[in-house]
Amino acid sequence: MVNLECNVKSCMHNDDNCCCKNVIQVGGGHACRKDETCCESYDERMGDRFTNMMEQPKHMLDVKCTATNCIYNEDHMCRASHISISGMNAAQMDETKCASFEMN
Ligand code: SF4
Ligand code: SF4
């Protein structure tokens, strides 16, 4: 499991810089840079009435990841102890990224 912080406020799963999901999917099959990754579990926040009130922020979660060029990728799972997902001004999935990507 990975300790994750996320500053993507426009995602409905974000609560106070934490993610409320138990598992997320990071994409970046051919990524050679951080910018070429994204959080594929991003869902646009459509307003408070669409926020799932049952969701609680998770500090540790499983991170599936297709960015196999990253040193932390092992069998499509992230093995880093801590990662940051970023996208302060993201309005869609493509504008998020894994800021912890390190080229192998
Ligand atoms: S962008 Fe990804 S990591 Fe961040 S809150 Fe949304 S689903 Fe979780
Ligand atoms: S640190 Fe690497 S392996 Fe972990 S989620 Fe980010 S890109 Fe994927």
Image (tube, rainbow, N blue to C red):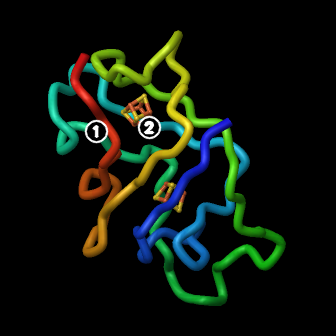
Q: Is mark 1 within 8 Å of ligand 2?
A: yes
Which quarter of the figure has residue 8? bottom left
Q: Residue type at mark 1: give it.
A: Thr
Q: Which residue appears farthest toward the right when viewing the image?
A: 54
Q: Which is nearer the eye, 71 or 53? A: 71
The image quadrant where one finds ligand 2 is: top left
Question: Circles 2 and 1: CB distance less than 8 Å?
Answer: yes
Q: Which residue appears farthest toward the front when viewing the image?
A: 81
Q: Which is nearer the eye, 43 or 69? A: 69
Q: Which residue appears farthest toward the bottom when viewing the image?
A: 48
Q: Is residue 31 above or below residue 5?
A: above
Q: Is mark 2 within 8 Å of ligand 2?
A: yes
Q: Is residue 102 above or below residue 92?
A: above
User: What residue does disc 1 label?
Assistant: 37
Which quarter of the figure has residue 98? top left
Quadrant occupied by the N terminus: top right
Q: Residue type at mark 2: give it.
A: Val
Looking at the image, is mark 2 or mark 1 earlier in the sequence?
Answer: 2
Q: Residue at x 77, y 68 (%)?
A: 55
Q: Which is nearer the eye, 80 or 22? A: 80
Q: Position of residue 85 (x, y in %)?
A: 40, 54
**How far apart, in angstroms, are the residues tagged by discs 2 and 1?**
7 Å
Q: Position of residue 16 (x, y in %)?
A: 57, 79
In the image: residue 94, left or right of residue 75: left
- Looking at the rendered structure, the secondary structure element under dot 2 is strand
Quadrant occupied by the C terminus: top left
In the image: residue 88, left or right of residue 2: left
Circle 2 Cα neighbour tier, 10 Å, few/some/many (<14 / 14–19 / ≥20): many
Q: Which residue appears farthest toward the top when viewing the image?
A: 75
User: What residue does disc 2 label?
Assistant: 26
Q: Is residue 63 above or below residue 92?
A: above
